[in-house]
Amino acid sequence: MDALIIFGETVLGMLIDVLPIAAILIGFQVFILRRPIHHPGRVIFGLILVLFGLALFLQGLELALFPLGRLMAEQLTLPSFILGEGVEAITAFTWSDYLWVYIFAAAIGFATTVAEPALIAVSIKANQVSGGTITVNGLRFAVAVGVALGVALGTFRIVTGTPLHWYIITGYVVVIVQTLRAPRAIIPLAYDSGGVTTSTVTVPLVAALGLGLAETIPGRSALLDGFGLIAFASLFPMISVMAYAQISEWRTQRSRRKNSENSS
Amino acid sequence: MIAVLKQFLRSLLASFKDLLPIILVISFFQLVVLRQPVPDLGQILAGGVMVLVGLSLFVQGLQLALFPLGEEMAYSFVRKGNLWLLLLFAFTLGFGTTVAEPALIAIAQEASEIAASGGVIADVEEARQRYATGLRLVVALAVGFALLVGVIRILKGWPVQYLIIGGYIGVVVMTGFAPKEIIGIAYDSGGVTTSTVTVPLVAALGIGLASSIRGRDPLIDGFGLIAFASLTPMIFVMGYGMLF
């Protein structure tokens, strides 16, 4: 019964989220452009699916994934797990004590990005528009690798306590250099993939990990460091998506060269 | 009927594949690394089924409603040929979808408390409320502005990197001048604007525009709206912090 009430509240929240969008779309289409909506039944059915799908999805995450993910982030950053049984507080440590934290950060960053609905949407569109040269799973994989690297490096930064802006500025410089060299067609998509990763699934789990780290290591601020991880998660996908395009271009060029050598 | 059911089952299977990495990672760490039993297994299974069904319903609805709607509107605007109307639509879409965003409401509330405790505004309910509402309006304005400029970019065929790198420079310069308390909130507000419903619509709009205008490539010109929409709020919010 309680679950039903909570689900009702989630649907209501989604409705408030979606209603202004629907109002804008229908208002412009019907009253300003004066064009009927094609297949209105299908569109309305689709909107209902989106609404209920997202409500179910969020509710399920709240029930299953988030509590477990938060618990694990807590356990993994516990002093007794990092430095062995019986250790109550962290005073002396080296960055390599946190190896499992980096691995968990990378793994959970990768896994949650693959399930991110907004990224699925963008990948489907990119696949259609590129005529199949960009595959849905290829793009998602490239973005997920970027998030994995970014979040792992972000946890490393929290552990070592090095300043955030140096990492971010270096990242920006890499992005700019890659922009000059990468195939032109991938650049807008790479930029967009930075924005879509900071969405419903990844952020809560990654933030929980940052919070756990910041709370147990002396001298770290929960507010500042939790935020830093998200910045990493939206920067690195741009680099990895452009790198993915650069590598595949380089490989086709190399195989073309080989072919022309063989034939001559 | 059977065809619909079959398609639903197929999309369920696809969603299961999407969620499989999370299941593997969580169980590996829980059972092998942490060596802890999984608590509340029943609840987690129930939640997992909800996530699975929800994700496949969402993807179905995406293809049925959000994508065709966004693209159809883009075509209608191009056919109508009224630039001002298109720009008005872009702005309204950005503003309207952002101003009601629950994540933004939460962040604005938090920001007003930080500002009140930092002595930037008076620590009374009314002043906090005004600050929070102002912040929400500023972020929504920023997203509206981003879509407006992004649409102009598609029409003109400007390369996206000029806008984005220009935006980065704007962010860095503003970071140097803005008050310290606002910076974290400003950076966060960039992320919250790209919600799960807005992203597919905005992507479809951009691609629809780029593919119905001659000489524009949907891949090169159609993408990039989302990136710009998560950049401008940072600049606008830091500007808001400087005004107070």
Image (tube, rainbow, N blue to C red):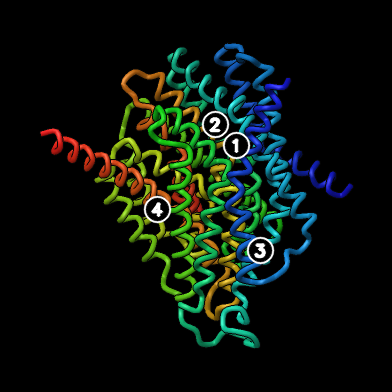
- Amino acid type of disc 3? Arg
| Cα distance in 3D space between marks 1 and 4 | 26 Å
On the picture, is B65 further left or further right than A198? right
Find numbered disc 3 in the image and state the secondary structure of the residue it sits on.
Answer: helix
- Label 4: chain letter: B
| Label 1 with label 2: CB-CB less than 8 Å | yes
Task: Name the residue that disc number 4 marks.
Answer: B171
Circle 1 or circle 3, nearest the eye:
3
| Label 3 with label 2: CB-CB less than 8 Å | no
Task: Name the residue that disc number 1 marks.
Answer: B197
Q: Nearer the viewer, residue B124 or B214?
A: B214
- Label 1: chain letter: B
Task: Name the residue that disc number 3 marks.
Answer: A70
* Relative image position of residue B153 (x, y in whole percent): 36, 31
- Are the residues under marks 3 and 2 on the same chain? no
A224 to B102, vertically: above or below: below
Find numbered disc 4 in the image and state the secondary structure of the residue it sits on.
Answer: helix
- Amino acid type of disc 2? Leu
* Relative image position of residue A176 (x, y in whole percent): 30, 50
